[in-house]
Amino acid sequence: MKNTLSSLLKDIKEKGNYRRIRYVRPVSGATIIHNGKEYLNLCSNSYLSLHFHPAIREAAIAAVEAYGTGTCSSRSVSGSIDLYKGLEQSIARYKGYKRGLIFPTGYMANIGIISTIPGKGDVIFSDELNHSSLIDAMRLSHAKKIIFRHRDPDDLERKLKKYSSPGGNLFVITESIFSMDGDVAPLREIEGLKRKYGFYTIVDDAHGTAVFGRQGSGVEEFCGLKGKADIHMATFGKALGSIGAFVLSDAVVIEYLVNRARTFMYTTALPPAALGAAQGALGLVANDLSYKDQLWRNIDYMRSRLTRAGFDLKDSVGPIIPIVVGKDSDAVKMQSMIMKDGFFLQAIRPPTVPSGTSRLRLTVVRDFTQEQMDGAIYAIVAAGKKMKLI
């Protein structure tokens, strides 16, 4: 076994695709320490910088003081402390759904939904660039899987006409904001097709929650479809600054997941600190839009200047900014250039993105100052010129 793994690792290194863990220590909502040096963090998903917000930290501490450090049981046994009930009700109300169910992670939530609900005789239609958690979940499902072209409702309709069969249920699965490209799913068009073909929608709003929409509830609100998906999944671990995920739907779906979703039933429940932080963050953003508004001012600033410099940001919108480099080794080289200037980010390579599209995935957060953004833009532009991207 070890000889085989060593050979495979050697091949990964030769392709410029080898990953190393970089250990960091956060020192603010926007900066980290790595190997004794301070960096501006350009790859955090904490879009609202709430993971370092004093009120959220206090909420986590208060939960520990009241409930202890861990639940030490699955939710099906004794792990469902009453913090869960309040948070599930709050997030369902915020998002426009009837019921909610919290899972430990977004990966586990997606596995739980898709391995449990679509079954034999059903057909799943999935966007070709869906997140790995959705792909892995589909592999565990007994339903037939059909892939449609990225953000292409015409191709989806062609596939619906070709592969729909009487008797089984149809499911269309998409991210709302695609995590590596930062582009928006055509949810309005998918909703139109849903009325025509009668399928069920499963929407992953992990990167849209608390960022998109007038009230910040997510991409469904942004598209005028708040509460319209049949099954909605999103997380507390990105803009809301904690950890955990939630599934939103009606009572029948939620109760079935409670009774049959293995990633809900057979894993230890989230600790009180995570629930306290998530509830604190949700209360903050639901009642104060200034956090989201400041984030969008930073997004507009970064995007306008990178575009003006000549970068092709594709169809991305919002805080995720992809700079596609191409070769794995070139993406790593550009990453190293920028890190030398004090800006922390990661080269994204296969299997996370398709071969030949290795990239730098920049993210904008609320706590960036203009001075920090100007420094980052200068470093990115200089590296882009050296790599002949602009």
Image (cartoon, rainbow, N blue to C red):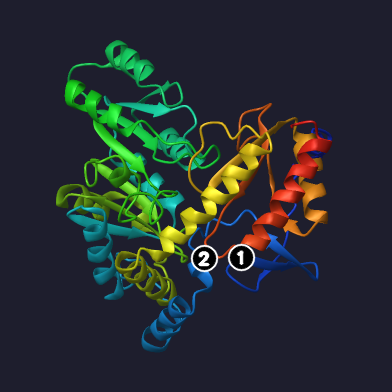
How many marks on residues?
A: 2
Residue 379: x and y in percent read 76, 50
Give the residue drawn at x 84%, y 34%. Answer: 14
Identify which residue, 115 or 220, lies in the foreground: 220
Image side of residue 220 versus residue 17, left or right = left
The quarter of the picture where the N terminus appears is top right
Disc assigned to residue 30: 1
> Within 10 Å of the Cα at label 2, are there few (<14), some (14-19), or many (20+) other Cα atoms?
many
- Quadrant assignment, res 328: top right
Can residue 202 be spotted in the picture?
Answer: yes
Can residue 344 be spotted in the picture?
Answer: no
The earlier-in-sequence mark between 2 and 1 is 1
Residue under label 2, please give it.
49
Dots 2, 1 in contact, CB < 8 A: yes
Disc assigned to residue 54: none
Give the residue drawn at x 40%, y 49%. Answer: 208
Identify which residue, 12 or 173, lies in the foreground: 173
Residue 304: x and y in percent read 58, 43
Give the residue drawn at x 32%, y 71%. Answer: 283
C-alpha span from label 2 to label 1: 7 Å
Image side of residue 47 versus residue 228, left or right = right
Residue 199, above or below 158: below
Residue 389, above or below 249: above
Residue 51: x and y in percent read 51, 69
Identify which residue, 219 or 73, lies in the foreground: 219
Identify which amino acid the numbered label 1 is placed on: Ala
